[in-house]
Image (spheres, grey):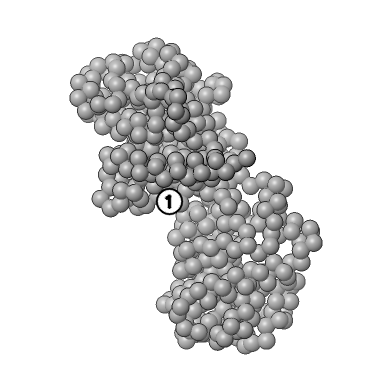
Amino acid sequence: MIELLTTTEMAEADRLTTAGGTPGIDLMENAGRAVADAVSAVLQGRRVVIVAGPGNNGGDGFVAARHLAERGYEVRVSFVGERKRLKGDAALAAERWSGPVEAASPVSLTDTDIVVDALFGAGLDREVEGLPRAMIKAMNAAGVPLIAVDLPSGVNGTSGAVMGLAVTATHTVTFFRRKVGHLLLPGRLHCGAVEVADIGIPASVLERIRPATFANGPRLWGRLFPMPAPGGHKYSRGHAVVVSGGVSTTGAARLAARGALRAGAGLVTIASPREALSVNAASSLAAMVRPVDGAAELAEFLADRRRNAVVLGPGGGVGQATRDQVQAALGSEAALVLDADALTSFAEMPARLFAGIAKRSGHGVILTPHDGEFTRLFNAIYNDPKVHAKLEKARMAARASGAVVLFKGADTVVAAPDGRASIADNAPPTLATAGSGDVLAGMIAGLLAQGMPAFEAASAAVWLHGEAAVEFGPGLIAEDLPDALPAVYRRLFEELAKARAARP
């Protein structure tokens, strides 16, 4: 279940299901039962308060209340709003509940063992104020397990934004598929463990909805992942080139080169200025080092089509020389990863970069900005007051640039010009260390060199990057990432081999 839905797409999934003959109250019953099951799994007391709102999320809460009472729990419903405003399935669910319903008050949460948040769910698109805000604050202060229905109240399901204040749940039960807001920050930080419940919506509705956002993982890109073939050799696994900066900044290129090697590229060459040849050569064993000075020599070097993937920018310096090298690389037939200084060098003239990308035909270009680099290169998009979500910013940047955009962070988004996007949720905090982005750029190039398409290569590298950091654990520095990859690859290859063997 890798698809991530917006609130609009989830509403359409509901509509298509009910139009197909499944009563909406049946979906609500299944949702409420799933919430009751989650409460039953919490081994802490028998007193439950369900904070219910006046929409369908509240209806799910009323169903959960009934099922929990039938299981012997002491259940109270704390209702926010006017009960007469309940409509449709939510009103029917409330009618089926014969237990106590009290007007919501923060004091109602002071004597309970478990709280269920059925206030707003995923559809909230306005700031939380008044009594709902007071109830959210009280839920967070209750000091007991807190189970959210669909999405913690106060989190926007499409953007992951916190609408002023949000519930911080210990567990979230969502339905059919996860929502975008479950993965994007800061929403993800409020969800706790997320469980996806089957409530009777058939997977076939996805053919009509055609979601374009996915959770990043092997199920997204695994069928295109390059696995070593028995008859393969180093030349069949591609040749990645990493362009180095001057003597004082060669470390970034060497990190990228090692990342490309560990990612599986058959050959990796550091294209080094002559002044830095000895430094690069002395500390690079498996990677080759060749003298390449300036844009003209880089263009000549990349004229050899066997050199089919390039990383440009790490430690390269900001300015005209880097811009010229980027233009030379764009003129080649190699797939291209532009990182760090290669992006900042075009901050004052992004249209020039995008025009160069537009002239290429069929050769992937990947831009890998962190937040500051994104601000500089896509300033108008970043500061557009109408665009709040990181996902939408990345998509707009991909369309504007014509490149795959890898917008880094704890919730890294990879967006393609055709609208596809992936969101990663496996990056540990230890990845926030100098040089880790250089390794990532090299890993992407290593996968590109082996023929993986740009969107899939970028997504796979992001996932592998996170898994390598998890594998190594605390104390991580950038040099550790490539050496943690083999253990990750062993597990991945086993998983992919089984999946491919099972495929008809």
Relative placement, left or right, of 408 versus 247 is right
Which of the pair 260/213 is nearer the observer? 260
Please state which amino acid type lies under the numbered disc 1: Asn
Residue beneath the point at 73% across and 70% down? 25
Label 1 sits on a secondary structure element that is loop
The image shows residue 132 at horizontal and vertical percentages of: 56, 73
- Measured from the top left, where is residue 64 in percent x and y? 61, 76
Please tell me which residue lies in front, 282 or 295.
282
Residue at image location 57% in from the left, 68% down from the top: 149
Image mark count: 1
Q: Residue at x 41, y 23 (%)?
A: 233
Kindly tell me whether residue 119 is visible in this rendering: no
Q: Is residue 137 left or right of residue 400?
A: left
State whether residue 12 appears in this view.
yes
Tell me residue 217's x, y (percent): 49, 46
Q: Which residue is at the front of the view, 442 or 487?
A: 487
Residue 62 lies, in percent from the top left, at: 64, 77
Residue named by callout 1: 426
Q: Picture quarter containing residue 81?
A: bottom right
Say above or below: 304 vs 100.
Answer: above
The quarter of the displayed image where residue 266 is located:
top left
